[in-house]
Image: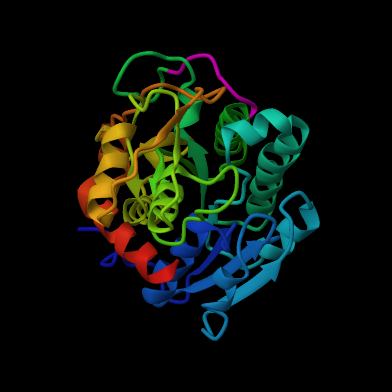
Amino acid sequence: MGYKHLKFPENSLFLVTGGAGFIGSNLCEAILTMGYKVRCLDDLSTGKQANVDMFIQNPNYEFVKGDIKDLDTCMKACEGVDYVLNQAAWGSVPRSLEMPLFYSLNNIQGTLNMLEAARQCGVKKFVYASSSSVYGDEPNLPKKEGREGNLLSPYALTKRCDEEWAKQYTMHYGLATIGMRYFNVFGRRQDPNGAYAAVIPKFIKMLLNGEVPTINGDGKQSRDFTYIENVIEANLKACLAPKEADGQAYNIAYGGREYLNDIYFGLTKALGVDIQPIYGPDRKGDIKHSNADISRAKELLGYDPEWDFKRGIDAAIEWYKENL
């Protein structure tokens, strides 16, 4: 069923933090298309001005340039808001290993500022981005909520802390919080550039340019790649979820498992190129296999992802062909 049929009270205002980023801008677009109001908060440190400019003429869209590390900014941004979709964070496991203090300030203190502002402003639901990295070295597949291992990176630690803080805010202050443990999200507007770019857009761009990509490790690692449309559905359904869903984090994935080598050679075939990859060392802090059990999200959020990997990757390839 997706999300386009979902109904919110008239004139509902959504605050999307990190709304100039990949996931955030897609959420802004979906909400505007459904006829509701969006306030986007972003400091444009990793988000893109182009993702703001595309909506700026829409009377239902408001852009606030600001930083979640500043509590006053968060308070102003939450005024009159019904639903918060908190996507503002710095991603990347390797980068978090280089910048642990910044990650703590940005991803933990920033989220805590947003929780406090949402509480004080009487927000109905606070939906926030977590990550599959919270499973750490827990070896069992599929990954199931409540069965987490030792954390393998500062990034993973920040996301686990966000979940614990959100739980406290639901328990003690009655703020309805719901966490989204994203599994390898991909799709339109995901940035293919830079040292920390996600693997799918990076491969597509390099192959389109005739360059030779490097695969970290042996390429036999597997991931539950999740198309952006499924993530939009999960966020919006979380806003409408019943009270018993609050205070918890949920796996947001398709529930499949794709191997990196298969993805790479699938992309070369789809793009009509014959380029052999280079294999490099494993990335520090990465987990080898990832695959989600999404039964709790189905049961408590009504999450029912429509986009499998094949459908998503075909759509992503078309988008990058037109936009790169």
Q: Does the magenta stretch include residue 149?
A: yes
Q: Is residue 300 magenta?
A: no
Q: Can residue 304 be seen in this view?
A: no
Q: Can residue 116 be seen in this view?
A: yes
User: Is residue 117 shown above or below 318?
Assistant: above
Residue 149 on image: x %, y %: 48, 15
In the visual, does 287 lie left or right of 120? left
Residue 80 on image: x %, y %: 62, 68
Colour mode of the rendering:
rainbow
Q: What residue lies at 39% left-to-right and 68% top-to-bottom?
A: 30
Q: What residue lies at 39% left-to-right and 58% top-to-bottom?
A: 208
In the visual, does 36 lie left or right of 312? right
Q: What residue lies at 30% left-to-right and 19% top-to-bottom?
A: 141
User: Is residue 254 shown above or below 282?
Assistant: below
- The one of 9 and 40 positioned closer to us in this rendering: 40
In which quadrant of the rendered view does residue 319 lie? bottom left
Q: What residue lies at 68% left-to-right and 69% top-to-bottom?
A: 64
Span colored in magenta: 148-154
In the visual, does 164 lie left or right of 265? right
- The one of 301 and 22 positioned closer to us in this rendering: 22
Residue 131 on image: x %, y %: 48, 36
Residue 36 on image: x %, y %: 44, 74
Q: Is the magenta stretch mostly helix, strand or loop?
A: loop
